[in-house]
Image (cartoon, helix red, strand yellow):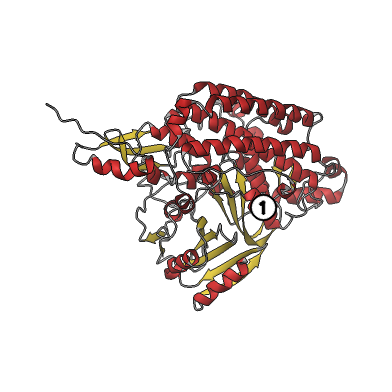
Amino acid sequence: MTAKQLASELNLQFKEIVSGPMEFRGELTLEVSDASRIADVCQFTKEELGFDFLADLTTIDNYEETPRWTAVYHIYGYEHGCHLRLKTSVSEEASELPTVSTVWRTANWHEREAYDMMGIRFAGHPDLRRILMWDGYPYFPLRKDFPLAGKPSEMPDVAFSDPAPLEGGPFVTVAADDDSTRREPRARNIEG
Amino acid sequence: MAATQQLEVKDSAARSAQAVDDLQDLQGEKMILNMGPSHPATHGVLRLILELDGEIITKADPEIGYLHRGDEKIAENMTYNQFIPYTDRLDYLAPLANNVAYALAVEKLLGIHDKLPERCQYIRVICCELARISAHLLGLGAFAMDVGALTVFLHTFTEREKIYNLIEALTGARFTASYTRIGGLSRDLPEGWTDELAKFTKEVSTAIAEADKLLTRNKIFVDRTRDVGVISREDAIDFGLTGPNLRGSNMEYDLRKAHPYLVYDQLDFDVPYGEVGDCYDRYLVRMEEMRQSVRLLDQCLAKLPGGPINVDDAKIILPDKQKVLSSMEELIHQFMLVTQGQDAPVGEVYFGAENPKGELGFYIFSKGGGVPYRLKIRAPSFANLSILSHALPGHMISDVVAILGSLDFVMGECDR
């Protein structure tokens, strides 16, 4: 069974909501238009089509576009050796998807990571806590509106967000618009 | 007279469910034990919160994220070549293999994955297999050390030192190699390097045989690892285990065979796999994988072709420095590549490579231009560790170190 055949079987089963497949570099992508049924689609791929391995689950922030979130599922079947990619989108207001951790247990951590990094909740998840950041961290760092430099947070006991200890000190180059010779520690210390 | 109760110790699969029930009457309060994040057996900064009933674990909750650096966020803000040094710091025991996996993923996106010159592909295979030997030597050494066989670690580290010398001669750095470039390699093999490598493959074979003698039939080692931490094939697949941990659970699956990349389909090697899926099987799989890697290295050395190491595409590979200084066109290419990076098409790809720890996958979602819109790293250690809360309960507390050692994870990759 080829990936194309498997994809068309999935199309047939969920006619109204699954569209595609689109092919790029030999990889097939199927869009699921109704995000609330993604778990059913996944259940079907596992039970009927033999996709027993969830290789990866991730999310994309389509910042300033609607719907804002896209979830991406990479599934693989050891028996037939075919990959498929399922994508589904969900609006910022909803920000919630049904969990697939009941289908593949590996999704448990992947979904916790998606929640931690993007702030998308997974309904029915047994243990939806932050996983990489600490409990109580107020932001979702992989969102496009979160700055690369980070934001200060009010948790001095867990991690500090003050300037680095030596910043502004005599041996540290400052980041500024000046040219590099002026930014050098030696250049600054002449005056002081 | 105090009543003594006989407890029958069965095999570990039965132990997990039975032991807890049997002890229900005897138990007092349960105890919470915190292990890590800084503990010699957690190989980095893994923290385990264990709930204990006497010496038996009833609940395990792994806490990760102590080494989280936001690599995926960083990747969204730089060109494809600029991210290569960050891949060194994922599985920092096998930087070369990460470099290769990442370069292959980006090349797939750019559509140049089938245009790589032969020599480049062979050198990349050499890199991957050197990295595998290096990672497994450390993994096995540390595993043996955790269960009480200290000597092996010293032997394997001597061999790793030789690998580091080879990597230093090849890339200029011992640890953070950053050797690949999108579309090729940062430099060709230095003169005499292949002879050094040939010498090394002979020496390391001896060393592997020595480690094998020290461990494989070592009574204490076997007692500590056999039937401990049994992971069934179904569980292994369901929890997304990959690499030696999956193969240990009686699953003959290797990405190098199932979906060959580079020149793996032209090379001859076997895929070892275990039977029961206990710590001992995972140990045996890694041991055999090293021997197969040595085989692969020898074949690569015999077959290594000449020719260029980079794709012939001025929009992918930096031009020769001499030409940049003397010719307008090369100067423009250099400028465009350095300031804007390779112009990737709109699209998305996923590429998974068989790394020492398992399937390291990169998912790149591109909206065009030189910077990925989203880059997701599918880290094998992340998925491999997620099984802990399922695999640990029912075991004795002293088995934790054996199970952790046999899973052979790296936190740099798990936390990203």
Nearer the observer, B410 or B391:
B391
Question: Residue placed at 60% from the left, 61% from the top?
Answer: A82
- Quarter residue B302 falls in: top right
**Residue A13 visible in the snapshot:** yes
Nearer the observer, B387 or B361:
B387
From the viewer's perspective, is B54 left or right of B131? Answer: left
Residue A66 point in image, percent of width and height? 50, 69
Q: Which element carries disc 1, helix, strand or loop?
A: helix
The answer for which chain carries disc 1 is B
Is B358 drawn above or below residue A30 in the view shown? above
- Quarter residue A153 falls in: top left
Residue A104 point in image, percent of width and height? 44, 57
Residue B326 point in image, percent of width and height? 88, 44
Image quadrant occupied by the N terminus of chain B: top left
Name the residue type under label 1. Val
Label 1 sits on residue: B106
**Residue A159 visible in the snapshot:** no
Nearer the observer, B217 or B209:
B217
Residue lying farthest bottom? Answer: A16
Residue B335 point in image, percent of width and height? 76, 49
Question: Residue placed at 42% from the left, 32% from the top?
Answer: B401
Is B174 drawn above or below residue A137 in the view shown? above
